């Protein structure tokens, strides 16, 4: 495999493309497809283990590294989204190195397929404000049902049947009840604070744990209102993942 042969194949369809041999047999593709900040996509060609008439299009781990600067694949739900993008685009993931093996005569189509997948993955950080944000409650539920099973988790519990706001998760330890609420946004924070007031007025016996998607996103008044009524808060899901189990044992000792 040499750059001259590859360029001849590609330039019949894409004339503004070049190759740069970074290491022997490993060619960086200089292509007019860029990230939104102007950086060029990190795409490389190398020989494919699938056969002499095949070529491997890969990124040497640069795509997931770039994504990690702004967005962490830190939960099973987020990993599933990434896996679905790769599957839907026919891209393999070898310990972070994304790659696609294609016949030499379809290198142009393979290059565009790979570039499109890279762009979708790097744009996952925007899904953090849209689709991926909605996974916050799912991520919380997955953590509770897989890592906190010793506390007998029960979802969607209604301490007061006549009150419309319930508890996301009921945990139990040493015969004490813990009410876990997920909070994303000001409206949800208001509702949880109101629910906690109602439970207090009804003289229920419980410990409240509030898990925020991002506590810093809340308005000052909503944050203060919730803080006055919650027993313990976690500014983000990661904090609950790290400390939740130990805190529960300590508070119910």
Image (spheres, grey):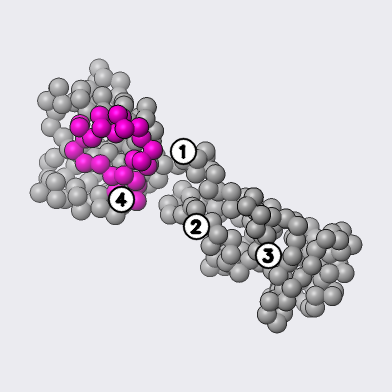
Q: Report the magenta residues as a range.
A: 214-240
Query: Where residue 152 sits: x, y (%)?
Result: 24, 44
Mark 2 → mark 1, Cα distance in angstroms = 21 Å
On whether residue 216 falls in the magenta region, the answer is: yes
Query: Where residue 141 sits: x, y (%)?
Result: 36, 43
Which label sits in the foreground, 2 or 3? 2
Q: Circle 2 is placed at which residue position?
A: 69
Residue at 43%, 54% in the rendered image:
74
Answer whether labels 2 and 1 touch (C-beta < 8 Å).
Answer: no
Q: First in sequence, mark 1 or 4: give its number.
A: 1
Q: First in sequence, mark 2 or 3: give its number.
A: 3
Mark 2 → mark 3, Cα distance in angstroms = 18 Å
Answer whether labels 2 and 4 touch (C-beta < 8 Å).
Answer: no
Mark 3 → mark 4, Cα distance in angstroms = 36 Å
Q: Circle 3 is placed at which residue position?
A: 43
Residue 247 appears anywhere in the view: yes
Q: Residue furthest top?
A: 162
Query: Where residue 124 sits: x, y (%)?
Result: 55, 48
User: Neighbour class for label 2 at 10 Å: few (<14), some, many (≥20)?
Assistant: few
The residue nearer to you, when weighing 145 against 178, is: 178
Secondary structure found at label 3? loop
Answer whether labels 3 and 4 touch (C-beta < 8 Å).
Answer: no
18 lies left or right of 82: right
Mark 1 → mark 4, Cα distance in angstroms = 19 Å
Q: First in sequence, mark 2 or 1: give its number.
A: 2
Q: Which mark is residue 134?
A: 1
Q: Quadrant of residue 204?
A: top left
Q: First in sequence, mark 3 or 4: give its number.
A: 3
Q: Circle 4 is placed at which residue position?
A: 239
Secondary structure found at label 4? helix
């Amino acid at each position: 495999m040499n750059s001259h042969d590859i360029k001849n194949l590609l330039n019949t369809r894409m004339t503004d493309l070049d190759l740069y041999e970074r290491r022997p047999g490993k060619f960086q593709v200089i292509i007019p497809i860029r990230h939104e900040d102007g950086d060029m996509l990190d795409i490389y060609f190398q020989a494919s283990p699938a056969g002499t008439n095949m070529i491997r299009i890969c990124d040497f781990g640069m795509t997931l590294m770039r994504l990690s600067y702004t967005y962490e694949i830190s939960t099973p739900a987020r990993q599933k989204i990434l896996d679905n993008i790769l599957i839907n685009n026919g891209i393999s993931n070898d310990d972070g190195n994304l790659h696609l093996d294609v016949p030499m005569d379809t290198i142009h189509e393979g290059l565009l397929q790979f570039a499109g997948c890279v762009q979708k993955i790097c744009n996952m950080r925007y899904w953090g404000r849209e689709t991926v944000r909605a996974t916050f409650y799912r991520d919380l539920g997955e953590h509770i049902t897989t890592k906190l099973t010793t506390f007998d988790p029960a979802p969607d519990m209604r301490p007061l049947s006549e009150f419309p706001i319930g508890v996301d998760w009921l945990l139990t330890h040493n015969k004490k009840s813990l009410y876990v609420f997920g909070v994303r946004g000001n409206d949800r924070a208001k509702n949880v604070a109101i629910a906690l007031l109602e439970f207090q007025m009804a003289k229920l016996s419980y410990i409240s744990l509030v898990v925020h998607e991002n506590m810093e996103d809340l308005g000052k008044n909503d944050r203060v209102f919730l803080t006055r009524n919650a027993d313990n808060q976690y500014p983000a899901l990661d904090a609950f993942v790290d400390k939740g189990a130990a805190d529960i044992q300590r508070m119910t000792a």
